[in-house]
Amino acid sequence: MSRKLKDDVVLKVDDLSIVYQTNRGDVKATNDISFELEKGKAMALIGESGSGKTTVSLSLIRKLPKNAVVTKGQVLYQQRNGEVQDILKLSNNDLRKFRWQECAMVFQGAQNAFNPVLKISKHFEDTAYAHNWTDKKAIRERALNLLRLVRLDPERVYDSYPHELSGGMKQRTLLALSVLLNPQIVILDEPTTALDILTQRAIIDVLNEMQEKLNFSIIFISHDLSLAAEMADVVATVYAGEIVEIGDVNDMFYNPLHPYTYGLLTSVPTLDHTEDLLKSIPGSPPNLINPPTGCKFHPRCEFATDKCKTENPLLLADEGTHLAACWHPDKVLEARKETV
Amino acid sequence: MSQPIMRLESIYRSFKQGRQIVPVLQDVNFNVNSLEFLCLVGESGCGKTTTGKILSGLLPPSSGKIYFEGQDIATLKGIEKQRYRRSVQIIHQDPYASLNPTQTIFEMLSYPLFHHKFVKDHTHARTRVGELLELVDLTPVEDVIDKYPYQLSGGQRQRVSIARALTTNPSVIVADESVSMVDVSIRIGLLQMMMDLRDQLNVTIVFITHDLALAKYFAWEGRIGVMYLGRIVEIGKTQELIADPQHPYTKVLLSAIPEPDPEKTRNKQHIQLRSEDIPRLTELPSGCAFHPRCPWFVEDVCDVETPKLGIAVNSSNNVEVSCIPLQQGKVLNIYDT
Amino acid sequence: MLQQILKLPLNILLFGWRIRGNRAGLIGWIGIVAYFILTFIMPMFVEFDDEPKLDEITGPLGSRIVLVVHKDDADIKTFEDLEGKTVGVVSQTGGPILIEPYADTLTVESYRWSSRRDGPGIQAALVDVANKEIDATLIFSKSIEEFIYNQEDAELKDLFEDNLVISNPEFGPPHILGTDTQGRDIATHIVHGGRVLILTAVIGGVISTGIALVLGSVSALLGGVVDNVATALTNLILAVPRFPLLVVLAGLIRFDNTLLLGVLIGLLGWPALMRAIRAQVLSLRERDFVEAAQSLGLSTNHIMFREILPNMISFVSINFIFSITFAMYEQIGLVVLGLAPISDYTWGVMLYFGRTRGTLFNPDGASMALSPVLAIALFQVCLVLFARALEEIFDPRLRSTA
């Protein structure tokens, strides 16, 4: 696998396979995950519980738990100066520099990300100091600018304690903090899950503006299709540790090829009246210690054939950048034609 | 139409936090009609969960009356009171917290059956529990009945929760965000199952959620009530409310919802609010609680008088709105903002 | 009932198998079973050594009588070698008893022990051996060497050093842990000394955990006045330092009965646990499944015993184990200070005597102090390790996420 990346690619994941060692057996959390992230673009990893999406995101900053083993693969990151590194092989020192400075991750539940006895300003300063940026005034100026960017009252928020801010405000402050050191990639884990409608709207708008002004790449991990529809340029659906479909956002939403993607799209209610088409995907996520043979989705797939039970499909190119790991991508098209 | 199965009249609910009194619900009035699908929608802090608990008798109101089948429940005693308690059940949000981890599914479903003497003995209980599990589509029953909660998935646990609520043959079920913590692709299945229960068991369902799209799906044949900061600001038939929302807050909500359709959602026009700040319940604005953020704010009207539910004069539908300019005949257009 | 007792060893093994994944807990469990056998079963087979044998005073693994002979007879080493000879024994030392079975095959010459430790009886015996008036004498262990060396009388010293030789320094019965200051075998004391101590500690633990459980749950469930009174009482007892209180009480009451002591320790040890249990119950009371039970009309009894308590088994069991360890320490503390009954010769009493008889400062006598200390400490360690196994048994079931 070559270590040279195209100029506009900031992150390339190749055949990433991760296993959790538990006393019940080896959990195959991800299996040959591969994708590329271009500079300034947003990519959504859509999956449900047990899909492996969080595992992938944690591996990008090497925050996997102790019992996780990367059995295969590399995560190539291209710095601004063109130098390419494999994140999985970074030394501890380089890893520290990488985290937050090159790639920041915002976890779910902003409420717990802040130290309740430190002011917000101290959080910003500490983050900067950890990366050898000690100019207090400059830090403050940048922080205030960022807080303004996320539509908060800068001075007021900068000098307050976390408990003085509401949940939505904390979330946005965390977003500002995440881009303090001007990273090239920001990873967001379930940024809108369980949030109110108006708070979601605020976060999405703020993210859009931030990306426009600061031009970083985003990776979303979520099960929220609406978020992907709002912000993503590329969408990948993840099931049982594998990417089952990946493509441009319009392709994914308007021309889904994989039955899982199709199943997701037809199980989410919208404001349009499409009641009759909605149905849940039957069954539940598979056991990753003993996953199903062949295509891991076949037990729940309405189009499954014998081939699906024995052979695991690879991501096949349908047209150019729209890939689906399915032996019968035409079935979904047929099904969609019938319902229109 | 016969009388509503439940009615909330001038419900106020507040609690003490240190030395402050926090008003959670103010002047909440609405009916729950028999066998209807009613949704209470709102954001966090609007009081919808508290309303649900008051409906199911788990919380008493600070003032106001609750009527069940025409009777004021405060006047109910003894057997009558027990009957009311059995008739209104609640389903919680968190499938991981709503089941006792030390009990098997059979145990947790059979306790109420035995307590209320719905079953005579162990065999009878087992049969009945099996029936309930089949009602909620947890089949084959043998795969579930003797398991512990930690062995089931989130969706399965919610179904157990629903089955448990059904053990007392309730006439009303209050579902508080019951699908929010479940995988996206199985939410619809759960909702469909709950909707089927109405036809199979004659149960009225009140569904509480912050997700308007889910509310619309669930209550398409029924009604939606929108709550804001402890009050109902709009309530009416779902189809009318979604197609032609009246209250400014509802309009803003509908315009702000992200939708799983790229073209639509990226080209949607969002109504801008006058302020991002959500007032605290302890510092409620004067008059209409929404006025500091309302794009159609009318000075000296909205910040003075507290609105009550009433019909918007110039609207084509019959939803009730808590907005004085609307009740006075004003028409709110998006281009006015 | 009999069936249960017979099945007990099997159950013990099964339990050990169940927790085999948790190494620490397994070690603890094995240790506890070993201790149970040591303190409850072995006393039936091992007799308590109650007999002072002044010549057997020695440290571990070496407590023997020595055989002293004239230099010329240095090849005499065993009882067979002594056949037909004249052996001197000093009364009140282990010699007379040791020689009894062989009294037919040799001639016994008795010397009288005197009131001083290194009295004339011993001296006379040694002199006679040196002068070949008797063939051998059975006497103290290695301290006889010091006795000879420390002789003030230069003439005697020379007599001894020139003529005597210790032909078999390991003549008598062995003592694994050595002997105490009276020559009694410590190992037998250890075997007998655990029973009462452990029982008392368990009683103390049961009482304190029981009170804490009842008071904590009731006050958390009922709230209001009951809660306030219970909490006030708890805080009161908590504020009073337990050990000094026990010391004071010991001065006022005669603790004749060890069991009574256990009860008293239990009655004073519940406050901290009560608060913890109360906090647990309070938090469990707010859980969704309790609310669901209330909504379904289930009784308060049911909620307490079927909903809340089962979620606390792990917590209560582990704290029960710890309360046993605390009760044990308190008891031993009192005994070592001499404030509690010493009628039962428990490990704590051994420590007390160890302290008062000066063994803490004497390397030879170290075993008398260390053996009970080790016995107690290892037992506590086993309890604590076992508590970890309890955690694993109860928790996986209770874990709420799959």
Image: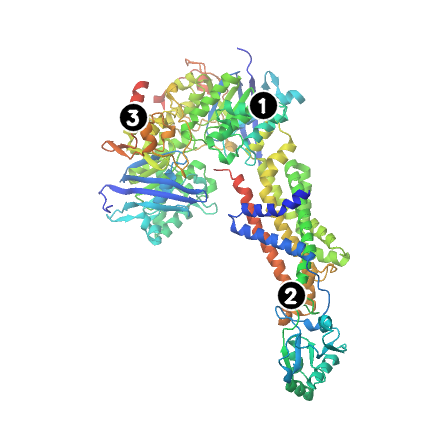
Q: CA distance from mark 1 to mark 2?
A: 67 Å
Q: CA distance from mark 1 to mark 3?
A: 46 Å
Q: Which residue is mark 3?
A: A254
Is the same chain shared between marks 2 and 3? no
How busy is the neighbourhood of tag 3: few (under 14 within 10 Å), some, or many (20 plus)? some
Q: Which residue is mark 1?
A: B168
Q: Are marks 1 and 2 in contact (CB under 8 Å)?
A: no
Q: Chain of mark 2?
A: C
Height in image: B313 above or below A122? Answer: above
Most extreme residue toward the top, as rendered? B1
Residue closer to the observer: B13 or A244: A244
Height in image: C260 above or below C81? Answer: above
In the rendered view, does A50 fall on the left or right side of C42?
Answer: left
Q: Which residue is mark 2?
A: C369
Q: Secondary structure at mark 1?
A: loop
Spot occupied by residue B243 in the image (x, y as percentages of width and height): 39, 18
Residue closer to the observer: C392 or A163: C392
Q: Chain of mark 3?
A: A
Spot occupied by residue A81 in the image (x, y as percentages of width and height): 24, 48
Q: Which amino acid type is shown beneath numbered disc 2? A: Ala
Q: Quadrant of residue B12?
A: top right
